[in-house]
Amino acid sequence: MMHWLDLAGVAVFAISGTLQAARKHLDPFGALVLAVVTAIGGGTLRDLLLDQRPIFWIRSPEYLLVIALAAAATAIVGRWRTPPRQVLDLADAGGLALFAISGTQIAAQADIHPAIAVVMGTITGCAGGVLRDLL
């Protein structure tokens, strides 16, 4: 179940990154970069802090496929109709919720203190969007 929740979070944050790239008029490569950074940035930071190797998306490359499919679908739909601003906000909120849950669960499985697991869930949920906004 956690794996599917994690994949859903990756897809939603890939959509978020692609929508933000469209708002900034980036080319397709730039949109894909933002989609990838947004989708896996928080989990990558979590895995590095927890010293979990290999990083989740290196261990299971299906994450990159999900990102590519979500970004491509978002870009295709966006060519026909510009989504309202609320779609980006909804994708951000959905990704934050999904990753906060999955990040906390993954950290808890690493047998660390529950308070640290909550911090790791927060990092997992927030860091990808922060990295996207920085780029």
Image (tube, rainbow, N blue to C red):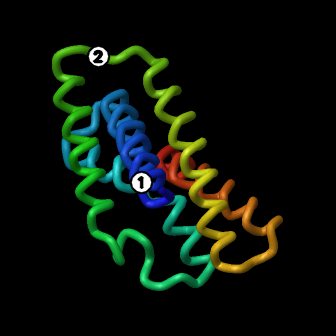
Residue 72 located left or right of residue 107: left
Of helix, strand and loop, which one carries label 1?
A: helix
Position in image of residue 98 (x %, y %): 55, 46
Closer to the camera in the image, 120 or 5: 5
Residue 62 disc label: none
Q: Residue type at mark 1: give it.
A: Trp
- Which numbered disc, 1 or 2, marks the residue that appears first in the sequence? 1
Residue 82 disc label: 2
Residue 4 disc label: 1
Residue 115 located left or right of residue 6: right
- Say which residue appears at 62% left-offset and 52% top-offset: 101
Above or below, 82 against 98 in this view is: above
- Say which residue appears at 53% left-offset and 36% top-offset: 94
Residue at the extreme front? 1
| Front label number (1 vs 2) | 1
Above or below, 100 against 18 in this view is: below
- Say which residue appears at 19% left-offset and 40% top-offset: 72
Above or below, 108 against 6 in this view is: below
Position in image of residue 91 (x %, y %): 47, 33
